[in-house]
Amino acid sequence: MGDGFSGHSASGLAFLLLGSWLSWGTARQWWRSRGGGGQFQSVVSHQDGWRRPWESWAKILVVLAYAMGEFLTGYWATYSFVKHGQHITMCGFFILNGLTDLLLFHRVPVPPQLQHLTASLAFWAESFLFSNHSHGMSGTNMTIHHLLYLPSYTAAGLLLLEAALPGLWLLSAMRNLAICLHGSWLVQAAFILYPERLGLQVWEEDSTMMFLPMLFSWHLLANLLLQGFWLLVTSRSEEAAKEKYTYSRLLEATSDCEEEEVEESGNA
């Protein structure tokens, strides 16, 4: 997350892209299960059919690059290295999740729920460290971090529920919403905490404290609309369009007599 505008905005954008990618994949998976008449199954990685685990490597390399940036920034900084050490620790859990993705992609015989577990631990560790990341900071900074780890904790809990209830689409959708909210709020935090970097007006402490919860709610609403957007876009995809007719036929036959009539008409 860094200690400046670029660190917060870059990491927030990364989470927002991750949440959007998962939202797109989950929506496509739901339309495909609906079109094929099958059961929706929750997954944390959407790279089925790929010859290489590009998603896993992208996550690992991005997190490694960020961790290296934190290390170098902390090494040359004049202030304490502890804050950067917390960020690097968060990165370690996300790298562990990426390595688990690789194991499952290459069909190493490990429980598939391990992917949900390591992803949950990554968001839990980030939430826990964020909740202890604002000592000595202003009231605005503390409130921003408090709102920041709420969706992260939510994502951690939902990932565990998905492992137990993989067929419930709502859990995956809520998890994706929480990750997108976490990312967009991180970007927003950069503008609130470091407005001088862009020549913007500094946020006043008293008015900001009242405004932050409402602004967070606006982010929640915007990300909810984003989830709906991905559902609409994927519903018009070629895969969903081709399988809708198959799905409708599954619902047509309600009795044995109707099935016989359909077969007779087909033979004729």
Image (spheres, rainbow, N blue to C red):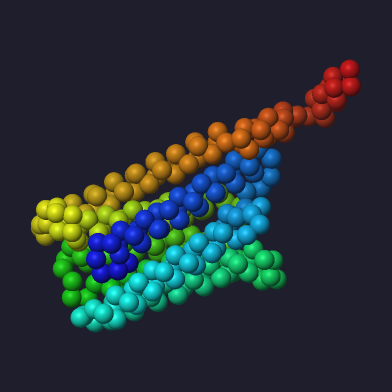
Q: Position of residue 224 (x, y in %)?
A: 39, 44
Residue sitting nearer the eye, 24 or 160: 24
- Residue 257 at least partly seen: no
Q: Please determine whether, in this image, residue 173 is positioned above or below residue 232.
A: below
Q: Position of residue 157 (x, y in %)?
A: 46, 63
Q: What residue is shown at x 44% (from left), y 44% (from top)?
A: 227
Give the mark count: 0
| Quadrant assignment for the C terminus | top right
Q: Position of residue 3 (x, y in %)?
A: 25, 69
Residue sitting nearer the eye, 65 or 242: 65
Q: What residue is shown at x 24% (from left), y 82% (from top)?
A: 80
Q: What residue is shown at x 30% (from left), y 56% (from top)?
A: 187
- Residue 78 at least partly seen: yes
Q: Is residue 138 left or right of residue 175?
A: left
Q: Is residue 232 left or right of residue 266?
A: left
Q: Position of residue 175 (x, y in %)?
A: 47, 55
Q: Please determine whether, in this image, residue 16 is positioned above or below residue 224.
A: below
Q: What residue is shown at x 36% (from left), y 62% (from top)?
A: 11
| Quadrant assignment for the N terminus | bottom left
Q: Quadrant of residue 16?
A: bottom left
Residue sitting nearer the eye, 27 or 65: 65
